[in-house]
Image (spheres, rainbow, N blue to C red):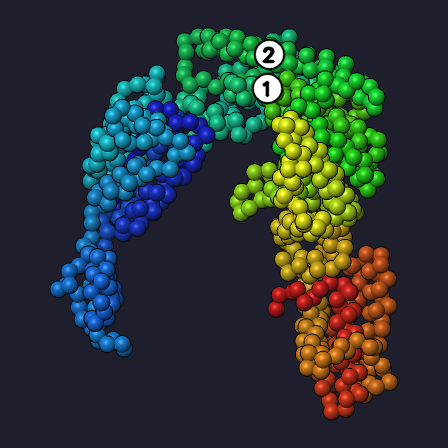
């Protein structure tokens, strides 16, 4: 079986697009070959800045002949139906067969396709792949119509086996396929031919091209660590940057330089961010002090002076970049020390705080300053529930977002929060306040760490609750896959903050309280907009509130709480808790107390994993079904209390005793939220319920006994439903 080698050689492909392009090339080509009737043993895709490569082993030499029978319309069908069938098959009426069928005589098409040689199929598939390649961005060049990420120069398409190699002939927009490629742009610019993948990879290596991106990454990381170790330093790990840099070079040559003494006082995150974002440098730190003291850059060539000229140029550019960062840092510190420390009622507000009055958060929700005031008020309310000092929580909330006006965050938005911590410390704020500035955006994702300091938790919760209530109030909810304001992330953040810190707080109470504040800000924003435009205030306020006007606040809150519950269900399913168990617990009172809800769900799942628990559910459902049917038939509710004196069997009397015993355990356990004890007590009912149903007929002719037994079933239902809504469980 032959092997196939494809290389698409072009100008430099952006590093961020290479991984997706490798996967797309492999999928499009292999899917196309298989659909056309070829099979293969294995496939692997590679990329460098100037080439996409696909190697396929064990490709069949030709596709098998295909014979397909397709049933058509009745021979008496209208002409239009017959013509449509003919078009779909590509046959003429004379080529159709007539066969007897249950509904009469029908047309059958017998379509025979001969096998095709692999080169023909490959040419068609590769042509379609190149012309329809899903680049995120593409371009046209010259006078051709072909679109590619960068100008495409050559196509290598080679089939090889023990007998030799042959070029698969095809031409795409004037670019003919061949068996040649090029090496490194500067170190080996010549053209050379190849015969198979092994020959191709070996010759590329001799031509200073490392084909495999994983191999380039490993080489960069090894050499960078070696350089740093020799200087008594260590490289700061950055996997994303490593992948990006490996996509920028074909022959990686790491070089290490030092950061000027003038810049060593900058926060390490500033140095790392500046070097990573602007110059793709790896940071090198002193393991003894943790200070960033050097960098590793990766050249794409070998020089006679061993990279000295490259390093000199890079250090010159780096010094200019870090000079800007140093200026931002020193200027921001001046503002922080002179402004943030003066924050107090009645005193002049900080320069940044004043600036945030003019920064719009959302045109219906007011400015960033309005939002900060809301978050501060909410953080103060939440603080006692998470063990935080209310004064510190409010102060932290008022300071946490002020770095949005700093020059450093203006240059590096990804440092917001972190720079707020540094500026708060410089202003003499307590560590709890400074750390809250750093942590209040967290958690940003499912794997991000959850803050644990009480002040940070209070501010982070307030920030996310304000986001949710605000956008719910103006009806900007997530739809399908669209979530422009990251409300799903905010909801998951609330859940993880509450659960991760055991914050036993009724979320709905906070949502209702905060929604009132949000609606007030909506009205104030509408008034300001009306005054600025000279319009009528009542018209403006009506437009601002039209999405919520006429909707009762509890309905809005219930809708938002349902959204939180949906996020919680996703979160708990990832923790291994069954969806129906979650539904059974959500149906109970107090479902806005998230830790309580999770505690109940965990206990219920543990109970259902026991034999008694699983069988008890079956017994409960049997009791519930019989009782429900009797109540519907009789038009009454059997809930007036069962009396043991009417019991006729030992099993019936044993069930009365078991229910009394379970009730005595369950009621106090539920009051103390000891769900494990309550559910264990509930599980003990399994045996007496089973015995009762085995020995006792519910619908007896004696109406007094029948009514008493139905009331007994009601007691079973009441006791079980006091723990969780077992009707929600599957099965």
Looking at the picture, how far across and down is residue 214, in whole percent? Answer: 45, 32
Which numbered disc, 1 or 2, marks the residue that appears first in the sequence? Answer: 2
Whether the residues at callouts 1 and 2 have beta carbons within 8 Å, the answer is yes
Q: How many marks?
A: 2
Q: Identify the element where label 1 is drawn.
A: helix
Is the residue marked by circle 1 packed among few (<14), some (14-19), or many (20+) residues within 10 Å?
Answer: few
- Give the residue number, with chain letter if any, for mark 1: 411
Residue located 31% across and 46% down the image: 32
Residue sticking out furthest to the left? 94
Give the camera-side residue of 552 and 526: 526
- Could you tell me if residue 281 is visible in this image? no
Give the camera-side residue of 411 and 476: 476
Tell me if 15 is positioned left or right of 494 in this view: left
The quarter of the picture where the C terminus appears is bottom right
Residue located 24% across and 51% down the image: 63
Looking at the picture, how far across and down is residue 175, in whole percent? Answer: 23, 30
- Could you tell me if residue 332 is visible in this image? yes
Give the camera-side residue of 250 and 531: 531
Which image quadrant for residue 625? bottom right
Q: Identify the element where label 2 is drawn.
A: helix
Give the camera-side residue of 248 and 568: 568
624 to 668, vertically: above or below: below
Residue sticking out furthest to the bottom? 701
- Give the residue number, with chain letter if any, for mark 2: 324
Residue located 24% across and 40% down the image: 123
Residue located 42% across and 18% down the image: 300
Looking at the picture, how far across and down is residue 136, in whole percent? Answer: 41, 34
439 to 85, vertically: above or below: above
131 to 703, vertically: above or below: above
Is the residue marked by circle 2 packed among few (<14), some (14-19), or many (20+) residues within 10 Å?
Answer: some
Looking at the picture, how far across and down is residue 186, in whole percent? Answer: 35, 16
């Amino acid at each position: 079986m032959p092997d196939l080698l494809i290389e698409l050689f072009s100008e430099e492909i952006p590093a961020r697009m290479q991984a997706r392009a490798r996967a797309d090339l492999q999928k499009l080509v292999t899917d196309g070959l298989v659909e056309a009737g070829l099979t293969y043993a294995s496939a692997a895709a590679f990329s460098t800045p100037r080439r996409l490569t696909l190697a396929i082993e064990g490709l069949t030499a030709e596709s098998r002949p295909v014979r397909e029978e397709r049933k058509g319309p009745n021979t008496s069908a209208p002409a239009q139906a017959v013509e449509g069938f003919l078009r779909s098959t590509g046959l003429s009426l004379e080529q159709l067969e007539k066969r007897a069928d249950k509904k009469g005589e029908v047309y059958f098409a017998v379509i025979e396709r001969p096998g095709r040689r692999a080169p023909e199929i490959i040419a068609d598939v590769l042509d379609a792949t190149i012309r329809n390649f899903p680049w995120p961005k593409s371009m046209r060049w010259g006078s051709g119509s072909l679109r590619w990420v960068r100008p495409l120069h050559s196509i290598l398409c080679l089939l090889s086996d023990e007998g030799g190699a042959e070029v698969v002939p095809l031409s795409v927009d004037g670019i003919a396929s061949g068996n040649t490629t090029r090496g490194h742009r500067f170190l080996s610019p010549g053209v050379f031919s190849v015969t198979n993948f092994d020959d191709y990879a070996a010759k590329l290596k001799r031509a200073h091209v490392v084909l495999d991106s994983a191999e380039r990454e490993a080489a960069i990381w090894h050499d960078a660590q070696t350089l740093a170790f020799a200087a008594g330093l260590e490289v700061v790990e950055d996997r994303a940057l490593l992948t990006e840099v490996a996509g920028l070079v074909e022959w990686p040559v790491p070089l290490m330089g030092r950061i000027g003494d003038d810049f060593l006082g900058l926060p390490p995150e500033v140095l790392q961010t500046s070097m990573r974002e602007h110059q793709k440098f790896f940071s090198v730190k002193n393991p003894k002090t943790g200070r960033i003291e050097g960098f590793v850059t990766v050249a794409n060539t070998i020089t006679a002076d061993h990279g000295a000229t490259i390093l000199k140029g890079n250090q010159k550019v780096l010094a200019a970049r870090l000079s800007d960062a140093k200026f931002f840092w020193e200027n921001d510190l001046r503002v922080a020390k002179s402004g943030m420390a003066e924050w107090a009622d009645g005193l002049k507000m900080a320069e940044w705080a004043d600036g945030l009055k003019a920064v719009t958060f959302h045109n219906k929700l007011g400015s960033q300053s309005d939002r900060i005031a809301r978050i501060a008020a909410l953080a103060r309310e939440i603080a006692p529930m998470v063990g935080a000092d209310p004064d510190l929580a409010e102060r932290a909330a008022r300071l946490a977002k002020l770095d949005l006006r700093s020059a450093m965050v203006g240059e590096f938005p990804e440092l917001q929060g972190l720079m707020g911590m540094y500026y708060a410390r410089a202003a003499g704020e307590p560590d709890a306040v400074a750390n809250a500035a750093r942590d209040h955006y967290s958690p940003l994702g499912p794997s991000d760490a959850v803050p644990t300091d009480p002040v940070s938790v209070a501010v982070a919760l307030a920030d996310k609750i304000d986001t949710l209530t605000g956008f719910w109030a103006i009806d900007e909810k997530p739809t399908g896959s669209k979530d422009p304001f990251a409300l799903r992330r905010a909801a998951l953040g609330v859940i993880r903050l509450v659960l991760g810190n055991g914050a036993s707080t009724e979320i709905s109470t906070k949502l209702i309280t905060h929604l009132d504040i949000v609606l007030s800000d909506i009205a104030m924003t509408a008034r300001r907009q009306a005054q600025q435009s000279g319009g009528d205030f009542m018209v403006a306020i009506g437009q601002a509130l039209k999405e919520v006007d006429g909707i009762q606040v509890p309905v809005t809150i219930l809708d938002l709480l349902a959204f939180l519950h949906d996020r919680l269900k996703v979160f708990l399913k990832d923790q291994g808790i069954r969806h129906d168990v979650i539904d059974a617990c959500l149906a109970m009172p107090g479902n806005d107390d998230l830790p309580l809800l999770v505690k109940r769900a965990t206990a219920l799942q543990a109970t259902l994993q026991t034999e008694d628990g699983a069988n008890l559910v079956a017994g409960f459902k049997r009791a519930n079904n019989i009782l429900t049917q009797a109540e519907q038939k009789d038009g009454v509710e059997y809930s007036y209390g069962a009396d043991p004196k009417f019991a006729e069997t030992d099993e019936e009397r044993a069930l009365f005793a078991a229910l009394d015993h379970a009730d005595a355990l369950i009621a106090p356990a539920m009051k103390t939220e000891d769900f494990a004890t309550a559910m264990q007590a509930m599980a003990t009912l399994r045996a007496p319920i089973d015995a009762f149903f085995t020995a006792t007929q519910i619908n007896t002719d004696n109406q007094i006994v029948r009514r008493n037994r139905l009331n007994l079933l009601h007691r079973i239902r009441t006791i079980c439903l006091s723990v969780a809504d077992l009707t929600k469980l599957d099965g």
